[in-house]
Image (spheres, rainbow, N blue to C red):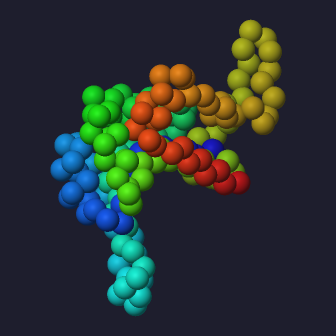
């Protein structure tokens, strides 16, 4: 199993530099999507994304989200103001691959004499605490979960 989390602010009306300036946070990475399509069809928007990645990929999802929220929390007001602009979207993105060969293997260990059965991967299941839900609400962020087998 392999999983990772990132937070993005995407816009088809602001550049990556404008997004970064409005929230005063350095991005871990940025993306520009749609440049080639825009050249062929100018009505197709170019989307700029400011991205903050979780520090530890393959940690439990709730821990990854918590590490991102901790980095963002002191910027709640500027994130909230920015995400309410038309053409700007804030997203907490969770990506999980259940059946792959390059992720974390399931740990089948005995605990107190009990044998763990296959299919109970240690990375299955996650939760959002009320504080995280409130933060995502305050900054008008969506939660997008992609899961692949």
Q: Which residue is drawn at 44% across and 41% down?
A: 140
Residue at x-position 48% and y-position 27%: 134
Asked whether the viewer can see residue 55, the reply is: no
21 relative to 61, above or below = below
Is 13 situated above or below 138? below
- The answer to whether 66 is drawn above or below residue 21 in the figure is above
Left or right of residue 6, residue 80 in this image: left
State the quadrant of the N terminus: top right
Query: Is residue 141 something one can see in this rendering?
Result: yes
Q: Quadrant of residue 10?
A: bottom left
Give x and y (percent) for residue 127. 60, 28
Left or right of 91? Residue 38 is: left
Question: Where's residue 47, x and y in %?
Answer: 37, 67
Above-or-below relation of 141 to 29: above
Judging depth in this view, the residue of 88 and 109 nearest the camera is 88
Decide which of 21, 138 is in the foreground and name it.
138
Q: In this view, does 92 lie to the left or right of 9?
A: right
Residue 42 is situated, as x and y percent measured from the top left of the image, at 37, 85
Please identify the quadrant where the C terminus is shown: bottom right
Q: Give how far across and how far down residue 96 sits, in percent.
A: 60, 47
């Amino acid at each position: 199993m392999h999983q990772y989390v990132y937070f993005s602010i995407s816009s088809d009306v602001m550049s990556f530099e404008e997004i970064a300036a409005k929230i005063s946070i350095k991005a871990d990475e940025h993306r520009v999507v749609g440049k080639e399509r825009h050249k062929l069809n100018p009505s197709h928007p170019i989307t700029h994304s400011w991205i903050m990645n979780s520090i530890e990929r393959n940690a439990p999802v709730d821990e990854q989200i918590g590490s991102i929220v901790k980095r963002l929390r002191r910027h709640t007001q500027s994130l909230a103001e920015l995400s309410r602009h038309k053409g700007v979207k804030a997203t907490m993105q969770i990506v999980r691959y259940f059946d792959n060969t390059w992720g974390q293997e399931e740990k089948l260990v005995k605990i107190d004499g009990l044998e763990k059965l296959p299919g109970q991967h240690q990375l299955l299941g996650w939760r959002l605490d009320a504080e995280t839900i409130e933060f995502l609400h305050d900054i008008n962020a969506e939660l997008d979960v992609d899961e692949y087998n």
